[in-house]
Image: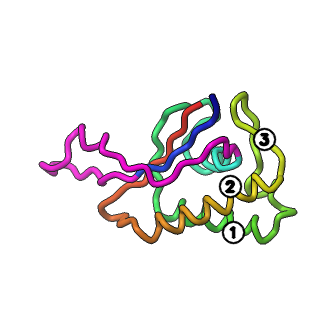
Amino acid sequence: MGLDMYLFKRKKFRENDPEFNELAADKRKEVCYWRKANEIRGWFVEHTGLKEDDNCRYIELNKELLEELRDDCLFVLENKDRAYEVIPTTSGFFFGSTEYNEGYFEDLRYTLRKVDEILDTTDFDTEVIEYTDWW
């Protein structure tokens, strides 16, 4: 058991589009996966409608929000002594370590790589990025 977090990509819903139906929403492609990266979950709680006790809820992310996550990760990686101010760790029963150690900073480097990749390969006019977690 533990905190598993995902970003998925899917086609954007367009009203009256014959190619899109309720089943199409289930055709999500996983584009990012984290394990026990509680600081990233905390960031999503702070910056989206996600609640601390939400579980298995899909949150749609826009390009600007992903750019903000990227910028915050980059800032912390360049200013490690300010990590607790920008992307603090969060505790939870299955959420893993709350230390600001190499594992924390590796989570941020991974997030930065994945978000850059998503920003480079996503057409935000026709595609949606969604966050969800399970714990």
Secondary structure category for the residue under label 3: loop
Q: CA distance from mark 2 to mark 3?
A: 12 Å
N-term mark: 2 or 1: 1
Which of pointers 3 and 1 indicates the residue nearer the eye?
Answer: 3
Task: Pick out the residue farthest to the left.
Answer: 18
Circle 2 is placed at which residue position? 107
Task: Pick out the residue farthest to the right.
Answer: 81
Q: Mark 2 near mark 3, Cβ–Cβ under 8 Å? A: no
N-term mark: 2 or 3: 3
Circle 3 is placed at which residue position? 97
Quarter of the view holding residue 107: bottom right
Q: How many C-alpha atoms fall within 10 Å of the one at disc 3: few (<14), some, or many (≥20)?
A: some
Above-or-below relation of 111 to 48: below
Q: Residue at x 81, y 68 (%)?
A: 79
> What amino acid type is highlighted by mark number 3?
Ser
Q: Quadrant of the C terminus?
A: top right
> Quick one: 75 or 3, which is closer to the camera?
3
* Bounds of the magenta segment: 9-38
> What amino acid type is highlighted by mark number 2?
Asp
